[in-house]
Amino acid sequence: MTIRFIYAYKWVRGPYTGLYAYVGSSFDPEKRDRAHSSRSDIPFDRAIKRYGREVFGPVEILEAFVAETKPTALSASIAREDQWMDVCNTYGTFRTPNKFNRSRARYIDAGMSAVGGRAGRGKVLTEGHKANLSVAKMGNQARLGLKNSEAHNQKLREANLGNRHRLGQTNSETHNDKISEALKGHPLFGSKEDCARGGRRGGPKGRHTRWHVNKGFVKAGCEFCMAGLV
Ligand SMILES: [Zn+2]
């Protein structure tokens, strides 16, 4: 069993206090929380570096998708993550210094023809593509792919965002231990392919780095994408 969490951060200091700053998704939000503070590869991480972690509140869990496998959980959550960005109003540009979601979540199902390649680079999945993803199995099917009006979003924010029972909560240690334990036996964690300069090139991990990591995609059929997901 695996769980994909959609999470969010709010501003708790300064002029934007009370507004959402960022929406993300993770199999392990606590681990992802630490990563946000130690990396600097996305605008939200850079904001933490610049302003300090304390200007944002604790990670809030907005929704959880339980499935047998990571790809299933991921494909179930991906369109909902986009919706949460709309609801929390965190999708912005460099002109909106309080909003740190820049690109929509992008995911390619195994066997799905490329959204990627040059044409797909930097593009958001179209509604048609989203409909193709196997999201329909979970959650509120009727609204998938729809955008809420601003007034409606405001109501949702005021209503404190639906699924409240997990708001502000984190997983128990036991639960996280179970998930880490499940990952330990994974053959991919033992992979020895050397992707450093001068190392072996052209192997599956090199292809993953080149075609998935560098292009910002997560591909269901790729063992490294699945193994590397936090
Ligand atoms: Zn990959």
Image (cartoon, rainbow, N blue to C red):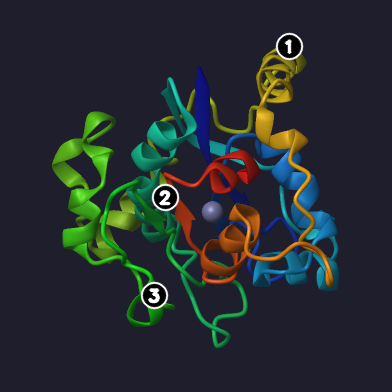
Classify mark 3 as within 8 Å of ligand 1 or not, answering yes or no. no
Which residue corresponds to mark 3?
Answer: 117
Residue located at (67% from left, 69% from top): 42
* Snapshot quadrant of residue 194: bottom right
Which of the two residues, 154 or 144, is positioned nearer the viewer here?
144
Secondary structure under badge 2? helix
Classify mark 2 as within 8 Å of ligand 1 or not, answering yes or no. no
Instruction: Please say if the residues under marks 2 and 3 sit with CB atoms less than 8 Å apart.
Output: no
In-image side of 10 versus 49 (left or right)? left
Question: Where is 173 relative to 145, above or below?
Answer: above
Residue located at (41% from left, 47% from top): 158
Residue located at (73% from left, 35% from top): 189
Which of the two residues, 123 or 147, is positioned nearer the viewer here?
123
Query: Marks 1/2: CA distance?
Result: 26 Å
The mark that comes first in sequence, 1 or 3, is 3
Residue located at (73% from left, 64% from top): 45
| Amino acid type, callout 1 | Thr
Which residue corresponds to mark 1?
Answer: 174
Which residue corresponds to mark 2?
Answer: 81
Question: Where is 79 relative to 136, above or below?
Answer: below
